[in-house]
Amino acid sequence: MMKHSKQVTKLAGLLLAVACAPAALAEQPTLQDIAKATQALPQIVIYQAKEIVTLDPEKPTAQAVAVVGDRILATGSLDELKAAARQQLYTVHTTFANKIIAPGFIAQHDHPLLAALTMTSEIIAIEDWVLPDGTSKAAKNRPEYLKRLADANAKLKDLNEVLLSWGYHHYFHGELKKADLDAISSTRPIIVWHRSAHEFYLNSAAEKKYGVTKEWFDKLPASVKKQSDFRNAHYWEQGFFALLPTLAPAIASPERLRKGLELVKAYYHANGVTLGCEPGGLLSKKLQDAQNAVLSDSSSPFRFYFIVDGKSITAKYPDEKVAEESEKLLTWGEGMTAYLPKQVKLFADGAIFSQLMQLNGGYTDGHKGEWIMDPEFFARSFRVYWDLDYQIHVHVNGDAGLDLVLDQLELNMRRRPRPDHRTVIIHFAVSTPEQVARIKRLGAIVSANPYYPVALADNYRSNGMDPERADVMARMSDVERAGISYSLHSDMPMAPGQPLFLMWSAVNRVTNDGNLRGPEQRISRLGALRAVTLDAAYSLQMEKDVGSIEPGKLANFTILADNPVTIDPMKIKDIAVWGTVQEGRVLPVK
């Protein structure tokens, strides 16, 4: 309290000095001069709350926060802030008097375009999806999945309309062949998008409509063909990315894209998000413009940032052109959207929802993992961006994939040391305690998806992995104990884009079927809150502006019905979100 009193006293002095500064130009300022100067100052808004969780180490909690414009002026008690304002005009905002103010939630790693397209498709997934326009219930087994897909086909009145469905998972729903899809319809194009969003399955009608012919397939690079099954019209990882442009007209029509982005915007706001980021989205100016059309307007309830997809840049350009081509993307944002400078995303191994991550020792059923970027290509790309002093965010899921990433990080640190490089280990599905220690030693940080054990551990412990490995996916307690900065992300649509749900997942590790998996890897509630606020900001090099409620930072707050740091851990995901304050704008959830 003593430190805080000094802060408020200093603030009062600063306000008085600012108020009197114009009058100081005269030899003998009058009271009228001071009054005029005071009236010219912007009005202070003081938000009163039941409690404010500031994440400011000097003042962890408060009862009021003073804001001028889009910035935080001070925190303290209501009386302290009113006294400190002195002559400067202020208003007291009491709407939050019985609520909790937390730092504005940050969606550290989400995909608005991907979420827009999947959430407006026919969702038949391994879990329920609760969306603003209704709930899509889970399909638990193969007969249920195929019936739901057939029912979706029967509901479509337009005989030429494409049936796009997302959520299928082979370990939950069984094997899916082209013949299965042809049996549902031999005339309607059917595209099944795997739950991982890294695989496509087509029926014969879809192949014909979109020109997926033998001639097209034969022209693909060898590494792409290895991740494709032309006979069964199944394409994964590199095969998926090769097929994506061909299917774009079917899955990303302007109408579907806009409708989906509007849904995603409402969804993020309803869950308290004040800032979001997509590391490594699709390298398409046309698709970026489509996102800007919805997300960049000044009325948007959050700012959304993008990070360069380095894989696409280095695949297309020689080393000496990488910087120039990467920097061109800085012009792609507008208004409430922007690209973050000097940051890039690379990919190591395959998706965990496809179970295509690279595992040391392999899988119990004998199948193989995949590389999204072949190791030599990854090494070249990492080196090029390292030498350009970019912060590198790396998608990696398996422990063998993590070895590749850490080997390259160590090689480049020894070759050309860089302080505060903040290399981000993204997703962090399967790892070892030794790798956690190495992450700490090399100065990397972690951005984990805590939903992996919740959604997958019960199934994976008997499919492809052993229980010991499946149960400790996303070993975040080890990371927390090591003192490594970590954030949590949803990778929407890989997990619901709900920061409170991510916190709940990491703190409890209770599966969708109600089982506790890897209890020793549960993290603290305070750490979980930091992971969707201050440490999320740190991972994006934005901690000086957002992430905590401290003087000088942007006035980004999430308004909650209860305190996620002190509530029963199992109730965190059920805390009601009143709305947000985003850069000083009060935005209730509709």
Image (spheres, rainbow, N blue to C red):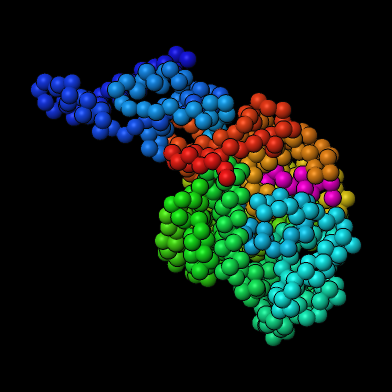
- Outermost residue on the top side: it is 2
Q: Residue at x 51, y 22 (%)?
A: 63
Number of callouts: 0
Q: Is residue 421 left or right of residue 165?
A: left
Identify the image quadrant of the C terminus: top right
Q: Considering depth in this image, is 498 or 576 the residue closer to the camera?
A: 576
Q: Position of residue 500 (x, y in %)?
A: 65, 39
Write down the quadrant of residue 477 in the picture. Answer: top right
Decide: is 361 above or below 468. Answer: below
Q: Position of residue 203 (x, y in %)?
A: 78, 76
110 up-or-down from 535: above or below: below
Q: Is residue 534 visible?
A: no
The residue range painted magenta reads 445-459
Q: Which percent across, then down, holds residue 71?
A: 40, 36
**Is residue 557 or residue 30 the one in the foreground?**
30
Q: Is residue 133 visible?
A: yes
Q: In the depicted view, which residue is nearer to us: 393 or 383?
A: 393
Which is the main secondary structure of the residues drawn in magenta?
A: helix
Picture quadrant of residue 124: bottom right
229 magenta-colored: no
Outermost residue, bottom side: 215
Q: Residue at x 48, y 60 (%)?
A: 292
Give me the residue at 69% from left, 86% from top: 215
Look at the picture and state if 203 lies above or below 346.
below
Closest to the observer, 148 or 57: 148
Task: Name which residue lies at 64% across and 76% down.
Answer: 246
User: Quick one: which residue is furthest to the left in this view?
Assistant: 27
Residue 522 percent across, percent down from the top left: 73, 34
